């Protein structure tokens, strides 16, 4: 297999990006060399990584993966990273728990096997560590000195932590009214944290303008000019789920939708495993989950539309509050192609689902996890998700980040330090 190289920050030297061969437009198929670009010059469609996996033997690849480290770099042969990625300072996220959720399954009436992929165990307690790890390696390859992003919260913390670990400067941009817990977690790493007056979509537009300005020279925006590399980190969720199931595809998977990128890359990861012969080719369904207060993709799906109309977010699930999701149309395609669906739940249902997951499985999810669990319950009730099939639900973050959502939860009772008081409280 030919090695694809790109120019590094050192004149006359190159870096290896493994099996990545080019950037390919998802709309028209036009290809350009690997570089820090995200939009097709022919049709302005989104660019994504193209690979050459032709030299891989299935069993050799499987053994190599299984012998790899307990993080996302076990899948380095399938990612756009340098050969020495594991030797560089990185947060090394991934290989999080796949929890067999029997108690939750009993509550929901699932008999075919229910699992929660709990990504709250990542270094900054969300799945964003996966995508930032990929973007960081691309930033190094292209010689960027500042790591940046537009964020609804979790990504800001992940970028700040990854940059600190790598010895790079970070400057991240967030809506000014984020949950305080996420603000603190993003700021603690010592980088610059800038609040923008407006929604996430306003923040994202500003970052796109900054890229084209001299003030943004030398900046790698993980979810803008580094987006093709960043997005590939979500594939590792699909890889891990299948490997943890004994190299089997789940029958059904429920994925939260913000920009929609995570869902599209989970699908890409599943298809790559099939192509490589690492899993048996069989049908699977992908379901998207949104909060009712920001549900542009769900609204389009239910209406039978191919175009996603932007909405102004108004939900407690702020990590999913992207009113104009870039990958929305592709989510619709995947849901329909696989026989899945896109559904939404109210904020009240989100909170109920957070409490349900915590009570049944000991997993305290942030609001996005409440969205996926709540949508899973609704899909079952509506007959759209088959409870007799193996189902995986994603929890993408830690509930400690969104304490405001469950602020009413507290003491069962307050008693005097006596047995009589204990009995009077009805706790005996």
Image (tube, rainbow, N blue to C red):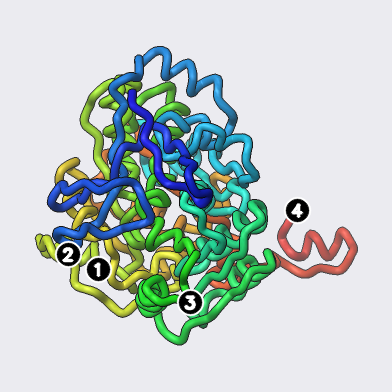
Q: Which mark is residue 428?
A: 4
Residue that numbered label 2 is attached to: 300
Is the Cβ of the residue at disc 1 closer than 8 Å to that at disc 3? no
Is the Cβ of the residue at disc 1 closer than 8 Å to that at disc 2? yes
Residue that numbered label 3 is attached to: 215
Counting residues from the start of the chain, the first of labels 3 and 2 encountered is 3
- Percent across and percent down for residue 22 are 29, 42
Counting residues from the start of the chain, the first of labels 1 and 4 encountered is 1
Local SS, label 4: loop
User: In this orientation, which residue lies closer to the viewer: 227 or 167?
Assistant: 167
- Percent across and percent down for residue 354 are 50, 58
- Percent across and percent down for residue 408 are 59, 73
Local SS, label 3: helix
User: In this orientation, which residue lies closer to the viewer: 320 or 274?
Assistant: 274
> Which numbered disc, 1 or 3, marks the residue closer to the eye?
3
Counting residues from the start of the chain, the first of labels 4 and 3 encountered is 3
Residue at the far bottom in the pictured view: 197
Q: Quadrant of the N terminus?
A: top left
Question: Mark 4 and mark 3: span between their CA atoms?
Answer: 65 Å
Q: Which mark is residue 296?
A: 1
> Which numbered disc, 4 or 3, marks the residue closer to the eye?
3
For disc 1, the neighbor class at 10 Å (few under 14, some 14 to 19, many from 20) is: many
114 left or right of 399 in image: left
Residue at the far front in the pictured view: 12
Residue 380 visible at all: no
Counting residues from the start of the chain, the first of labels 2 and 4 encountered is 2
- In the image, residue 52 sits, relative to residue 415, either above or below, namely above
């Amino acid at each position: 297999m030919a090695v694809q190289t790109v120019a590094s920050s050192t004149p006359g030297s190159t870096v290896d990006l493994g099996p990545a061969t080019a950037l390919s437009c998802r709309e028209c198929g036009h290809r350009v060399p690997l570089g820090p670009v995200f939009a097709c010059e022919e049709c302005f469609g989104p660019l994504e990584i193209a690979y050459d996996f032709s030299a891989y033997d299935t069993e050799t690849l499987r053994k190599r993966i299984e012998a790899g480290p307990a993080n996302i770099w076990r899948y380095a042969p399938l990612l756009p990273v340098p050969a020495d990625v594991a030797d560089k300072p990185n947060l090394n996220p991934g290989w999080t728990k796949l929890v067999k959720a029997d108690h939750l399954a009993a509550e929901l009436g699932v008999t075919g096997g229910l699992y929660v992929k709990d990504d709250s165990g990542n270094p900054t307690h969300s799945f964003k560590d996966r995508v930032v790890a990929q973007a960081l390696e691309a930033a190094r390859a292209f010689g960027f000195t500042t790591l940046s992003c537009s964020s609804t919260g979790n990504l800001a913390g992940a970028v700040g932590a990854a940059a600190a670990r790598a010895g790079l400067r970070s400057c991240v941009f967030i809506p000014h009214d984020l949950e305080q817990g996420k603000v603190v977690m993003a700021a603690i790493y010592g980088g610059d944290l800038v609040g923008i007056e407006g929604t996430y979509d306003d923040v994202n537009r500003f970052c796109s303008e900054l890229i084209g300005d001299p003030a943004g020279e030398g900046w790698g925006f993980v979810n803008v000019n580094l987006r093709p590399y960043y997005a590939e980190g979500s594939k590792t969720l699909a890889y891990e789920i299948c490997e943890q199931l004994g190299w089997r595809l789940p029958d059904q998977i429920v994925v939260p939708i913000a920009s929609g990128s995570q869902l599209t890359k989970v699908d890409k990861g599943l298809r790559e495993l099939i192509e490589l012969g690492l899993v048996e080719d069989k049908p699977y369904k992908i379901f998207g989950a949104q909060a009712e207060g920001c549900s542009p993709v769900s609204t389009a799906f239910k209406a039978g539309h191919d175009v996603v109309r932007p909405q102004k977010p108004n939900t407690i699930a702020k990590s999913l509050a992207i009113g104009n999701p870039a990958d929305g149309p592709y989510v619709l395609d995947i849901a329909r192609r696989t026989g899945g669906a896109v559904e939404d739940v109210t904020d009240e249902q989100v909170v109920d689902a957070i409490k349900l997951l915590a009570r049944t499985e000991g997993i305290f999810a942030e609001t996005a996890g409440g969205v996926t669990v709540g949508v899973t319950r609704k899909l079952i009730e509506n007959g759209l998700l088959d409870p007799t099939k193996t189902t995986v639900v994603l929890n993408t973050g830690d509930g400690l980040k969104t304490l405001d959502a469950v602020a009413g939860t507290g003491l069962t009772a307050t008693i005097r330090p006596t047995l009589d008081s204990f009995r009077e409280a009805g706790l005996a």
